[in-house]
Image (spheres, rainbow, N blue to C red):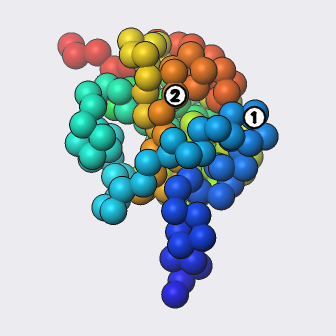
Amino acid sequence: MTTTDATDAENPGAHPRFAEALRELGIGDLVPQVRRFPEATRTAAEAAAALGCELSQICKSLIFAADGVPVLVLMDGASRVDLELVRKELGADKVTRARADVVRETTGYAIGGVPPFGHRTRTRVLADRSLLAHDVVWAAAGTPYTVFPMAPRDLVAHAGATLVDVREHAA
């Protein structure tokens, strides 16, 4: 049995670090609301299909590097991040998608399971306003198999995010 298997067996819901973050934020009552799927939901489309919700009700937690410094962008599942808008918002010279090792080092989670808060290190967080179009959104709970529901404004507040417009628009 690998370490990951042992962790999953001991805590079938949220990742232990994320569950602890919920408790520290005073919202530990969300732990029982975490949904676990038998198959990984690494993409927003997979999560939306598993939940039976709209793609835009999924909150993606994406790590980028702004002049080499990690930044978290929270985006609705139906949209893409416009890197130029992120660059302008941050006043950075260059913004790129972070490598998988940087994502894990920064957040403590693997791509496909990164939650909007409860990370290993504190990073700047931007949340696209498109998330506010719903009463509830679903975000990863620290593993590719788990998600949790939250009102978008609460999610933005707990993540310490700045509301911005960084969604890519069709030309």
Is 64 situated above or below 76?
Answer: below
Disc 1 residue type (three-letter) = Leu
Is 6 situated above or below 126?
Answer: below
Residue tagged 1: 25
Residue tagged 2: 150
Reading the chain from its start, which is encountered first: label 1 or label 2?
1
Q: Tell me the number on the disc at residue 80.
A: none
Structural crowding at the residue carrying mark 2, measured as other residues with C-alpha within 10 Å and reported as few (<14), some (14–19) or many (≥20) = some
**2, 34: nearer the viewer:** 34
Query: Could you say where residue 142 lies in the image, as x and y percent from the top left?
Result: 55, 52
Residue at 27 percent across and 31 percent down: it is 53
Question: Dot 1 lies on which element?
Answer: loop
Disc 2 residue type (three-letter) = Met
Query: Could you say where residue 159 lies in the image, as x and y percent from the top left?
Result: 65, 29
**129, 84: nearer the viewer:** 129
Distance, label 1 to label 2, CA atoms, is 13 Å
Query: Could you say where residue 98 lies in the image, as x and y percent from the top left?
Result: 52, 47
Query: Could you say where residue 31 lies in the image, as x and y percent from the top left?
Result: 60, 45
